[in-house]
Amino acid sequence: MCEFIARHKLLDSGQRIIVALSGGADSVALLAALAEAGYDCVAAHCNFHLRGPESDRDAAHCADICRNLGIRLLVRDFDVAERMKATGESVEMACRSLRYRWFGHILEHEHAHAIAVGHHREDNIETFMLNLLRGTGPQGLCGMRPRNGNVVRPLLECSRSQIEEYLDSRSLGFVTDSTNAANDFKRNRLRNIVLPLLDAQFPGASESIERTMSRVADSRALYLRLVADRAGRYRNGSDILVADMVNAEPEARMLLYEMLHDSEGFNMASVADIIDSANRSGKRFISSAGHIRELHGGVLRLADNTDCDEDEFPVTLDRDILSPTRISVERKHISEFNPHRDPSVIYLDASVLNASPGLVLRHWRRGDRIEPYGMKGSRLVSDVFSDARLSPGQKRATWLLCQGKRILWVCGLRASRHFSVGPGSEEFIRLEIQR
């Protein structure tokens, strides 16, 4: 175990370690071996109260083990049914969520370096087989890794028989979870039926699977380095040049998946949709983790989670507008009228002050049209946005100054011909959007 810890740089001597202690053979051996190696250990036991008296038996055994080893024990009782009711999770997922949320709290409170769990070689082989049967990629075929964030697995190369031999040598007892014998779960059927039969029919099968996992892990490490090198060609800050990638990379879908899956939670179906839509603009994609990406001109950009809202904000032009955006307002005599071309400025005849209905600021809505100053007819505001090459996020952030159904100004972009200053004007209003 110590050689494995050193090889994978899992732990440093002198650091405090939280050891997940169930009372079973693997967790008891892990706690004893880490303490024997000189690590500062604190044991943590979760009592989910799912097996009646057996759950309390496990907690009592953990207390006995820690007392014998002179190690401090933390115990937490959980209401799994309440968690399932609140979240809709399965029993397994509810227990996992409760366990690791508490472990995270302990890590911080105890100033600990890591959570050590007792997964061993057979656990790893079972995980490999489960992933294989579900259908998986290289990552799933690597099995469990020695480290996953703050969680470390020092026993991952130890077999169950080695663990039990160690416990016998230390005269340490352990408890057995009675549900492990039931074949209602896929993992139990693999453990109790499939893998023993496989080893009986193909001697050394488990060792071969273990070697396969190691080789796949090494290959994946090389693969990820190559992916990172290739992905760098298509990154511009947080933007991803998807159209360029599709044109240049035969395996663009897999490359984009590797760029987005772990960091943002996009699955393969979403990535395929992005690839198929690479040359479209305005399409949004939301990952299972809540990350949002938008396509704009072949570029996949990060976006916020706000959509164009339907709110309207009444405004008056007798003073500066401070909300929802800042616009300076000046009322002047026509003798001071000296316009110049500036999309951030608009000039309106002072009669706009008495317009009914009054003025509002709002965001763009699909189908909006403006009757531009100096032109006949009307244009879609979306076309004005396209001319300005705005991203979807910039479109949603642009304000429209409206009077009833008329759009007077696409703020910062285009003015309409309504309330324009003309020969009959005596006063005018100068508006300037403040960037």
Image (tube, helix red, strand yellow):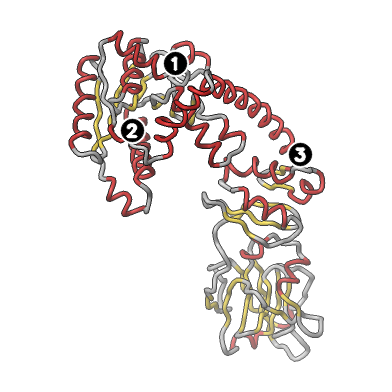
List the residue tagged with mark 2: 180
The amino acid marked with disc number 2 is Asn
Quadrant location of the N terminus? top left
Q: In which quarter of the image is residue 36?
A: top left
Q: Which residue is label 1 attached to?
A: 12
Q: Which residue is drawn at 55% across and 79% down?
A: 316
Vertical arrangement, residue 418 with respect to residue 101, above or below: below
Q: Dot 1 surroundings within 10 Å: few (below 14), some, or many (20 or more)?
A: few
Mark 1: amino acid:
Asp
Tell me which numbered mark, 3 or 2, is placed earlier along the sequence: 2
- Seen from this angle, which residue lies furthest front? 201
Residue at the disc numbered 3? 233
Q: Which of marks 3 and 2 is in front?
A: 2
Q: Which of marks 1 and 2 is in front?
A: 2
In the picture, the quarter occupied by the C terminus is bottom right
- Residue 18 pos. (x, y %): 34, 25
Residue extending farthest to the top is 169
Identify the residue at horizontal 70%, vertical 34% (top origin): 227
Cα distance in 3D space between marks 3 and 2: 49 Å
| Between 404 and 240, the one nearer to me in the picture | 240
Helix, strand or loop for disc 3: helix
Q: Do the residues labelled 3 and 2 touch (CB within 8 Å)?
A: no
Residue at horizontal 70 percent and vertical 88 percent from the top: 426
60 lies left or right of 90: left
